[in-house]
Image (cartoon, helix red, strand yellow):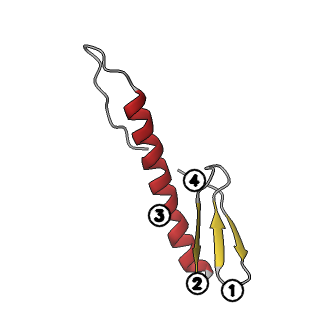
Amino acid sequence: MIFHVTLEPDEDGWIVAECPALPGCVSQGRDEKEALENIKEAITAWLWAEDQKALIAIPPKPGRCPIVVSV
């Protein structure tokens, strides 16, 4: 998957990375490279957490089995 992110220096000299498509998905790094590595981890964690919330919300039904699909 492809996500757009923004990079912005903060007042302490760190680079703040944010993924606007995923509310609250923010990270930082000492430089641009580290900030990009960290936001990739944050995006993965954000998507995993949303998936877990959705899985819990699915009521069990006979004959229905959740299946994992990788994209």
Q: Residue at 63% of width from left, 57% of height from top? A: 19
Q: In this figure, what is the number of numbered marks?
A: 4
Crowd tier of the residue under label 4, counting other residues whose Cα lies within 10 Å: few below 14, some 14–19, many 20 or above: few
What percent of the width, then of the height, locates residue 20? 68, 54
Q: Which mark is residue 41?
A: 3
Alpha carbon separation for disc pair 1 and 4:
27 Å
What percent of the width, then of the height, locates residue 1? 52, 50
> Along the line of sight, which residue is nearer the eye, 45 or 12?
12
Sequence-wise first label, 1 or 2: 1
Q: Are marks 2 and 3 in contact (CB under 8 Å)?
A: no
Quadrant of res 27: bottom right
Crowd tier of the residue under label 2, counting other residues whose Cα lies within 10 Å: few below 14, some 14–19, many 20 or above: few
In the structure shown, which secondary structural element does the residue marked by tag 2 occupy? loop
Q: Are marks 1 and 2 in contact (CB under 8 Å)?
A: yes
Alpha carbon separation for disc pair 2 and 3:
15 Å
Q: Amino acid under label 3?
A: Glu
Determine which residue is flagged by label 2: 30
Determine which residue is flagged by label 1: 13
